[in-house]
């Protein structure tokens, strides 16, 4: 999260060390990505994990040919799905009372925004919420608290994770590729990644607009 990250200047050193470790221990890139995306999706915990910066760094290592994209994608998507599922399960288990307990009661503003967003968009809020930093790790818990059906949540959870991770990796990947000469096969991978991301974002935006139209058409009371 940007606002938390900015409060810890030493985080740059932390990110550099993780990047160096991944380069020296490439077999650990997948599990580390799993832990990062899982932590990023957990309520409260996600506020303190600079997953965005680390995903950009990882994307750069993939673009430079240091890491396998499929290994990172598989582990990273799995971590994002598990993290949201845990947050959702926590909300279902504890219910509304959890918002009155520490440390959850310290994030009342984020929770209020997430509840309003979920009340308005429902299923789409889980799809889109993963892309919205301030409420990213809160939406799944709110969905659990407000009783969203398990199957609907998991569908939105999986779909959003599949789109979100390539989107996070793409800027670093494309930047690294643009530095050196680009082969035809490499260009194909970039175009395929960009196309899938743009298609996913376009579908989400279209869905939101479709949901807003009936609301605008309703006459206001009073």
Image (spheres, rainbow, N blue to C red):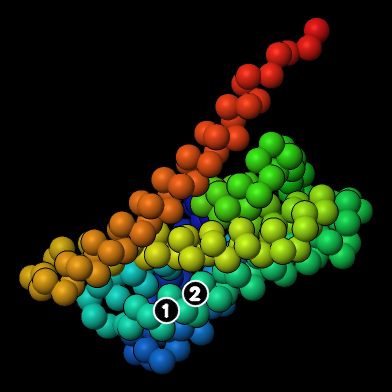
Image point (30%, 58%), residue name: 194
Image: 132 above or below 210? below
38 left or right, relative to 170: right
Image point (45%, 88%), residue name: 28
Residue 126: mark: none
88 left or right, relative to 68: right
Numbered circles on residues, count: 2
Question: In this view, which residue lies farthest toward the top?
Answer: 222
Q: Are marks 2 and 1 in contact (CB under 8 Å)?
A: yes
Residue tagged 2: 76
Question: In this view, which residue lies farthest toward the right?
Answer: 97
Image: 82 above or below 108? below
Using the rendered image of the protein, determine whether residue 4 is visible from the camera's viewpoint: no
Image point (40%, 65%), residue name: 166
Near-viewer residue (21 or 97): 97
Secondary structure state at the residue bearing disc 1:
helix
Percent of width and height locating residue 53: 42, 62
Question: In this view, which residue lies farthest toward the left?
Answer: 181
Image point (48%, 66%), residue name: 162
Percent of width and height locating residue 149: 77, 58
Callout 2 crowding tier (Cα within 10 Å): few <14, some 14–19, many ≥20: many
Near-viewer residue (54 or 130): 130
Image: 195 above or below 162? above
Using the rendered image of the protein, determine whether residue 165 is visible from the camera's viewpoint: yes
Residue 72: mark: 1
Q: Assign the C terminus to one quadrant of the image.
A: top right
């Amino acid at each position: 999260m940007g606002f938390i990250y900015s409060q810890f200047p030493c985080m740059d050193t932390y990110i550099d060390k993780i990047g160096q470790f991944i380069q020296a221990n490439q077999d650990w890139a997948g599990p580390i990505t799993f832990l990062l995306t899982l932590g990023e999706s957990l309520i409260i915990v996600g506020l303190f994990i600079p997953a965005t910066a680390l995903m950009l760094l990882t994307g750069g290592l993939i673009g430079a040919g240091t890491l396998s994209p499929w290994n990172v994608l598989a582990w990273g998507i799995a971590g994002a799905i598990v993290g949201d599922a845990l947050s959702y399960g926590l909300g279902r288990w504890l219910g509304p009372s959890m918002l009155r307990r520490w440390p959850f009661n310290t994030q009342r503003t984020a929770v209020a925004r997430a509840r309003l967003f979920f009340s308005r968009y429902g299923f789409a809020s889980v799809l889109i919420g993963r892309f919205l930093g301030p409420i990213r790790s809160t939406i799944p818990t709110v969905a659990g608290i407000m009783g969203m059906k398990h199957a609907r949540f998991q569908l939105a959870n999986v779909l959003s994770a599949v789109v979100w991770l390539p989107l996070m990796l793409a800027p670093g990947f494309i930047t690294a590729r643009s530095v050196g000469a680009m082969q035809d096969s490499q260009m194909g991978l970039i175009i395929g990644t960009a196309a899938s991301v743009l298609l996913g974002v376009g579908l989400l935006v279209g869905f939101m607009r479709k949901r807003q139209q009936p609301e605008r058409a309703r006459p206001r009371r009073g």
